[in-house]
Image (tube, helix red, strand yellow):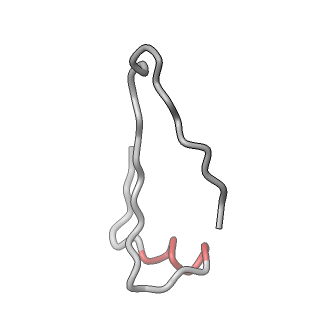
Amino acid sequence: THTPSPMKFLNTILGRPISEKPLMILVAGYPIKNVQVPAISRK
């Protein structure tokens, strides 16, 4: 993979302030039995 540096171009493309930094959270694996996922809504 190629990660450009600096990544400030993403802030411009996404219309986000420069004070925010791009971040990616990658979830892997399987949930435990009887897991309860909260029902959340977007703000």
> Which residue is located at x 54 percent, y 80 percent?
16
On the rendered image, what quadrant is the C terminus found in?
A: bottom right
Of all residues, the one furthest to the top in this rendering is: 33
Residue 13 position in % (x across, y down): 61, 74
Q: How many marks?
A: 0
Of all residues, the one furthest to the left in this rendering is: 5
Pick whichever, 5 or 39, lies toward us.
39
Side of 4 relative to 11 (left or right): left
Residue 11 position in % (x across, y down): 51, 77
Residue 25 position in % (x across, y down): 40, 47
> Which residue is located at x 39 percent, y 43 percent?
1
Side of 23 relative to 14 (left or right): left
Residue 15 drawn above or below residue 23: below
Q: Quadrant of residue 41?
A: bottom right
> Which residue is located at x 39 percent, y 50 percent?
2
Side of 14 relative to 23 (left or right): right
Residue 26 position in % (x across, y down): 41, 40
> Which residue is located at x 33 percent, y 68 percent?
5
Pick whichever, 20 or 35, lies toward us.
35
